[in-house]
Every structure is written in C-alpha cells, then in structure tokens.
Image: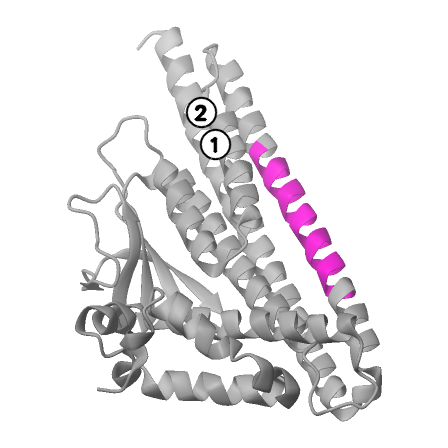
Amino acid sequence: MTFDDQLRRVLDTLTAQLHDEVSRRARTALDEVATAAQSDRDQAVAEIRREHDAVIAARDQHDQEVERERRAAQADLERERQAAHAELERLAAEVEAGRAAAAIAEAAPPPADLSALGARIVSGVRAIDDARTLSEILDTLVTWSAREAFRVAVLLASDGRYTSWRSAGFEPAFSRGEPVDLPPDAFTIPIAVGGETVAVLYTELDLDRPDFDPGFAAAALEIFAVHAARCLESVTAFKAARAALVKTGNRADETTDDSTAEDEEAARRYARLLVSEIKLYHEPDVLAGQRERDLATRLGGEIARARVLYEQRVPAQVRKQTDYFHDELVRTLANGDSTLLQLT
C-alpha cells in the first residue's frame, strides 16, 4: 500500500468519524429543542386554562384579563418560534461547517446539499407557521415532508386505528378518510396535541437513492412534525382563548352596537372551532354521512356535545338572534345542504 493510499484511508476514517459526530450533535440539539418546546407548550396551555378559570370566577375583569394574557402568550410564542428558527439555522451552519472541514481534509469540493437542507428546513418551518387553520397545517406538513422523504402521509389516529388525511408520493395515493393498516416496522412520527397523539407522519425512506441521507431526512421530518404539533396546539389554544371572549349571561349595560358585534363575531368563531374539530377528528364519519345523507345519525353524539359547549359560552341574547352553530354545521359538515343534518 502506497503512502497516498494510507493517507487516503486515514482521511476516509476521519471523515466518517466527523460525519458521525456531526450527526450525533445534530440529533442531540434537535432533542433539546423538542424537549424545550414541549415544556414551553405545557406552560402556555396551563396558563391559558388558569386564565379561563379566572374569567368565569371574575366576569367584571374578564375582557382585560383575557386580552392581557392573550398578548403575553402570543409574545412568548413568537419568541419561541424565533428561537427555534435561530437554532435551526445554527444547526444547519454547524453541519455545513463539519462537512466543509471534512472536504478540505480530503482535498475535494464540499457537498452542495447540506446548506440546501438547512434552507429547506427553515423554509418548511416558516411555511407551517404561516398556516392559519388545522387543515392547512396538516397539508403544509405533507407538502414539505415530501421534499425530504418522497413518500409521506399524514394519518389521523383514533383508538389505535389510522385513517388517511393526505399523502404524497404513494402510488396509488391514499384517499381522504380511508382506513390505513401500517406494517409493524413502519416509520412514523407522532403528532401530539395536549399530550394525546391525534395523528402520525408516516413515511417510507428511499434508501436506494445514492444521493439520499436517511439520517438527515429523519431529522428534518422530526422537526416538521414536532413544529406542526405545536402549531396545531397554538391554533386550538388561541381559538379557545378568543372564544372565551364570548360573555356569559346577560348584562344590562351591553347595549351598544360595538359590543353586540363583538359578541356575534366571538360566537361565530367559537362555532367554527367546534365544528372544525368534529370534522378533523371524525373525517371518515363525515364523508360517510354526506354520502349516505345521515350526518345527524352518525355524528349525533359529537354534535350534541359541541352544542352544549356552544350554549355554555355564548350569551342567550346572541343565540336567540342567530344560530351560528347550526349555520356552521350546514356550511362545514353538510357542504351547504341542510337536509343532510335531518334525522333519518
């Protein structure tokens, strides 16, 4: 073996060790980010619940207290997102620096895909941030995950069973609401809201591609899934906080047009939140009910539960004027056909 061969073997060994170290550090940093995000999320949810209890106990200070806590929570969330973005950029820069150092040692040009990976992760996180509804968050998660793993799907989880929400790269594509049986060795990443797994990100990694790094792809998918879960929780939590602005009971001094408009808008938002959750978590029943024209029979229990929550939050004078809850059922669940909600 010539000296050049020996030198190249040593450089190959060092390069492999450096790659392993960079991967290990990246995974460690990602785990720390996920742990910190979980802790921050738990604190934010606990704070919102305490404020909600305070609203019920002290109605006279209701508006000012909820608004103050909402702004504080929104500011905290923005700081957390900025910190997460900065951490992702730092990790991408660190990975790129490690690869560059290894390339210099080998006297070869550095790989060009690492900086692109970091940019894609940051862009994907920002795209998920920009989503404003539960459906948009899940759709955006599929879109950006497909750029890393080529075959991905978001599956809704309920009682140990999975139903398809959306897929990309699978042939044939999964149909919305279709039951899915996962293989025992399936690679899935849980999407948890309030400590409960409501969906999973399922992927099949393309290990045969010569330019594909499964370690980096798995890390990117983990970041997207964890961030999507936090965004789902944020949307749900802030919608609930806004819905709490609906005043309970009658107040003699609430006679102005501005207060009436505010009550009506709050009732409309709360109805939209309740019905959207029914559609999200019971998508197969919604589709079957539309097809068989028996939505009220299939979803009677969920609709009744949501109706009770709606009537507990919305003042009686607003409910008497307009039934926003029924309007939202017709619009969201029945696609505008009120006859689908008639008992059969």
Q: Tell me the quarter of the picture where residue 211 sits.
A: top left
**In the image, residue 218 lies at what x, y percent?**
39, 46
Q: Which residue is mark 2?
A: 113
Rendered image: mark on residue 117: 1
Within 10 Å of disc 2 (Cα), the crowding (few <14, some 14-19, many 20+) is: few
Vertical position of residue 311 compared to residue 44: above or below: below
Residue type pointed to by label 1: Leu
- Labels 2 and 1 touching (C-beta < 8 A): yes
Q: Secondary structure at mark 1?
A: helix
| Scheme of colours in the image | one colour
Q: Residue at x 21, y 45 (%)?
A: 170
**In the image, residue 240 lies at what x, y percent?**
61, 73
Q: Tell me the quarter of the picture where residue 217 sits.
A: top left
Q: Is residue 292 left or right of residue 69?
A: left
Boundaries of the magenta span = 72-92
Rendered image: mark on residue 212: none
Residue type pointed to by label 2: Asp
- The front one of 124 and 251 is 251
Vertical position of residue 76 compared to residue 334: above or below: above
Q: Secondary structure at mark 2?
A: helix
* Residue 257 belongs to magenta span: no
* Residue 78 belongs to magenta span: yes
